[in-house]
Image: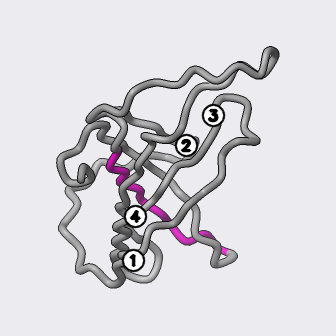
Amino acid sequence: MERLTTTAPRRTATREPVPTRAVRRQPLRVRVGQTPKADRESRYFDYKVGLSGDHEAYVTYCSDESKSFIKDRKTGKVEETPTTAGSYVLYNAKLARNAEGVWQTTDIASNRGSDECRP
């Protein structure tokens, strides 16, 4: 499991499962061809959002990266790779509401090759 964190302070507390408030079943398509490292398209689906009090939320979603490829920015050459189990990624994000009421991601973890996201 890959782990990415922001500069926000980390808390070591046991997290209780939170009730699911919303589920998005329709896939969201994002064009990523303008970024320096990727070309083509990533698809995001199966959103689940849970609230824990007024200032904390948890979001899980799947990503289909089977049509996203590495692109060399200098040459413009795209390195196409075959679709594997690792092309499907489960993300778990923790968000906190700041003093201005804006939701910010404070912690995120990914699980590449997750059975939950594979077709």
Give the distance between the C-alpha atoms of the residues marked 3 and 1, in whole angstroms: 25 Å
Q: Mark 3 belongs to which amino acid?
A: Ala
User: Within 10 angstroms of label 3, few (less than 14), some, or many (20 or more) residues?
Assistant: many
Q: Please give the label number shown on residue 38.
A: 3
Q: Name the residue carrying label 1.
A: 24
- Determine the secondary structure under disc 3: strand
Q: At x 43% / y 40%, what residue is drawn?
A: 66
Please state which of residues 51 and 54 is positioned toward the viewer in this rendering.
Answer: 51
In the picture, which quadrant includes the N terminus? top left
Q: Name the residue carrying label 2.
A: 6
Give the distance between the C-alpha atoms of the residues marked 1 and 4, in whole angstroms: 7 Å
Residue 90 shown in magenta: yes
Give the distance between the C-alpha atoms of the residues marked 3 and 2, in whole angstroms: 22 Å
Left or right of 49, for residue 43:
right
Callout count: 4
Q: Name the residue carrying label 4.
A: 45
